Amino acid sequence: MADVNYRALKLAQLLPPNISADPQIQAAANAVDDRFSRLIAQADKLDRFGRINEWSSQETDELAWEFHIDFYDSNAPLEQRRQLVASSMALHREKGTQAAVERLVTLLFGYGRVENWYEYGGQPGYFQVVTNNPSVTDELASQFLRAVDSVKRESAHLERVVIEKITTSMYYIGTVTHIFDKITITGRLD
């Protein structure tokens, strides 16, 4: 079966030849086509995630409420809120896993990874989050803790947040090779 572009399809094209010449039928077909094109335009708005970059601030906040995002902050930048809403279903699906914590920390703070207790020598049941965003410990600390608590396993406890500092430096390395022979002269001096 061939793909049909229903957006470009006109009812007059589908009419059988015996009635397609009737002006009243053509007028009715054109009226239906006009209404159908307006309906398609409205249906396009139903594709929420296909138009994520068009969401207004209010629409983003409403969708966050609808999708039950516990850690949502309506004062965050609009682009960050849009991404949070767009990935909310994946976060709900992954809730209670290391992947959910990593996804959320990366989304909210730019970079983050989770290390379980056995990876850094901690106590069983604990984990640490490694990030390179220093604001996690300053002004965004409460938001960070609330966000992590909303997606982590209940039996897992955040022990600490490690701030990684990544710098680029130029290192100069030089080597010298010196080869020599050792000569020993023995003799008597009188």
Image (cartoon, helix red, strand yellow):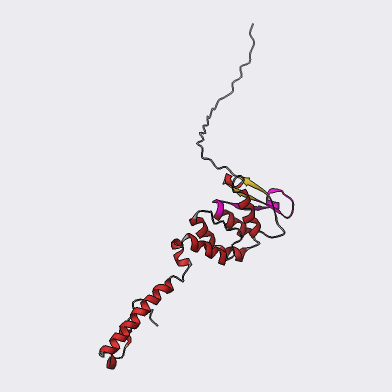
**Front residue of this view, candidates 59 and 155:** 59
Position of residue 53 relative to residue 20, above or below, is: above
Residue 108 screen position, x and y as percent: 56, 54
Q: Is residue 186 visible?
A: yes
Residue 50 screen position, x and y as percent: 45, 67
Tell whether 46 sits left or right of 2. right
Looking at the rendering, the stretch of residues picked out in magenta corresponds to 108-128
Residue 128 screen position, x and y as percent: 66, 50
Farthest-out residue, top: 190
Q: Is residue 9 visible?
A: no
| Residue at x 44%, y 61% (from the top left corner) | 53
> Where does the C terminus fall, quadrant-wise?
top right
Count of numbered badges drawn on the protein:
0
| Residue at x 54%, y 57% (from the top left corner) | 74
> Where does the N terminus fall, quadrant-wise?
bottom left
Farthest-out residue, bottom: 18
Check residue 110 for magenta coloring.
yes
Position of residue 73 relative to residue 176, above or below, is: below
Position of residue 6 relative to residue 66, above or below, is: below
